[in-house]
Image (tube, rainbow, N blue to C red):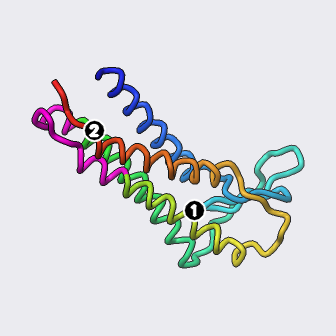
Amino acid sequence: MLLLLLGIIVLHVAVLVLLFVSTIVSQWLVGNGHATDLWQNCSASSSGNIQHCFSSSANEWLQSVQATMILSVIFSVLSLFLFFCQLFTLTKGGRFYITGIFQILAGLCVMSAAAIYTVRHTEWHLNSDYSYGFAYILAWVAFPLALLSGVVYVILRKRE
């Protein structure tokens, strides 16, 4: 049982790290010496040093992506906190429903953010020389892992 709890905690922390990195790092869209994320657009010299960074546009769709990514991080942190609270207060045989629901909500939020960004980024950058960066890919990787973690929490029963 201890090994199972350790595995669940490691999976949850991995999802949390993926969510933090994909929300913070400036690599959602890259190409032609530019790196773009949810918060700013940066241009770099040929040596890779960042020269200029400007705030991202105030498009409604980009603000919705920002909001859902922040919500996914909040839901995942809250889920981890609730897991530890329920671990010590839940009766024997009880299920971790609340923890699982919040983790599933985190997964759905990150999926919504990545899907909106996928559909709408062409309105923002019309140049086709851009490609998706690693932070965008990490957001998509966090989605199934968060859902898996949430389902495991819902199925999990507390034992002595």
The reply to whether residue 42 is in sight is no
Numbered range of the magenta stretch = 85-103
User: In the image, is residue 42 above or below residue 123?
Assistant: above
Name the disc covering residue 156, or none: 2
Please tell me in which quadrant of the rendered image residue 41 appears: bottom right
Residue 122 horizontal/vertical position (percent): 72, 74
Residue 150 is left or right of residue 142, and the answer is left
Q: Main secondary structure of the magenta part?
A: helix
Residue 60 is left or right of residue 30, and the answer is left
**Residue found at the very far left of the displayed protein:** 91
Amino acid under label 1? Answer: Ala
Q: Does the magenta stretch include residue 87?
A: yes
The kind of secondary structure element at disc 2 is loop
Q: Is residue 53 magenta?
A: no
The kind of secondary structure element at disc 1 is helix
151 vs 61, nearest the viewer: 151
At label 1, counting other C-alpha atoms closer than 10 Å, the crowd grade (few under 14, some 14-19, many 20 or more) is many
Residue at point 68% right, 52% down?
Answer: 27
49 vs 100, nearest the viewer: 100
Residue located beneath label 1 in the image: 114
Amino acid under label 2? Answer: Leu
Residue 102 horizontal/vertical position (percent): 32, 53
